[in-house]
Image (tube, helix red, strand yellow):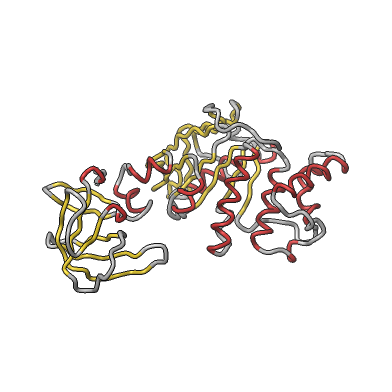
Amino acid sequence: MGKVSRMSGQALVSIRALKRSFGDVRAVDGVDLDIREGEFLTLLGPSGSGKTTVLRMIAGFEKPDSGSITLAGKDVSQLPPYERDVNTVFQDYALFPHMDVLTNIEYGLRVKGVSKEERRAQALVALKQIRLEGYEDRKPAQLSGGQRQRVALARALVNKPSVLLLDEPLGALDLKLREQMQIELKALQREVGITFIFVTHDQEEALSMSDRIAIFNHGKIEQLGTPREIYDNPKSAFISEFVGQTNRIEIDGKKVNIRPEFVSISKSGTTGDRVVQGILRDEIFVGASTRYLVETNLGFSMISTQVENDLKIGDAVTLSWQKEREFLVQI
């Protein structure tokens, strides 16, 4: 599992007109998606948006009602999971509690009939990649949540699948560990070069890890693009509010959006060509930044995260920003 070059641009997974219903609920409604070789692609969306159902259909755990899924040019839509060159990592790890770490990692290779010596050698390489050397003999119950997740990753990667599917794998971890694992997981994906398809409802997680993001809403992909493209140019009101914070305002007869970090707040002076007066109504400290809620004289409220010293609730303030930072969305 040596270092592999980044995305080739070639579609490794192609999904066409994919549909899946559960009773009267259309969970996936005509999804088309090409996933590139070596790509870290995230399926992002709220609960019930269809992202997990798509992942399960790629894995073979669910069969589509119609449409196709091809892997490396082969239609796998109706094949069972074990006949697809994919592996899945789950949120609950799914480790065997009676097996030690090394035996858990070796399991898939043993099923494939790999010799004991060879699977042990490959498992040790995988163990080094996840930086758990010395933990070979421990049982899952003796590991932390982050360590168990690393073992689950190693068990999947040691099989060298064409695609690794990750179903909210960091959801059970606390915030600090989750942020650490995001960095490690992305670095691991770059090292092994395997295509990762990652499901999450956490937009910050998606922005920090992905090469591209497919945003799901009501069973459809509402936008597909790089994190920067989606954040800077959301194509709908839903995306502008689901991915990051935004101010939706009407000014000069137009409905526009402006991100809070582009709005300056001051008791005097302006730094932009768009200027609005208002009263500071709330100050919300969130660690890395402070959010200022301002009731404007135009009849709407706005949030700014620009730092200004000596502001107090009730102060008359000026909000300003550059017009070029505004964006229009489909309402």
On screen, residue 329 versus residue 109, left or right, reads left
**At 65% from the left edge and 56% from the top edge, which residue is drawn?**
149
83 or 280: nearer the eye? 280
Look at the image and tell me in which quarter the N terminus lies: top right
Query: What percent of the width, then of the height, locates residue 201?
Result: 47, 54
| Residue 274 position (above or below residue 39) | below
Q: Residue 180, position in %: x, y? A: 57, 57
Is 24 on the left-hand or right-hand side of 278?
A: right
**Residue 254 vs residue 219, the one in the foreground:** 254
Snapshot quadrant of residue 292:
bottom left
Which residue ends up furthest to the bottom in the rendered image?
313
Image vertical order of residue 4 relative to residue 43, above or below: above
Q: Residue at x 65, y 39 (%)?
A: 192
Q: Judge whether residue 84 can be spotted in this image.
A: no
Taking 16 as reference, is 326 above or below it? below
Answer with left or right where residue 57 lies relative to residue 253: right
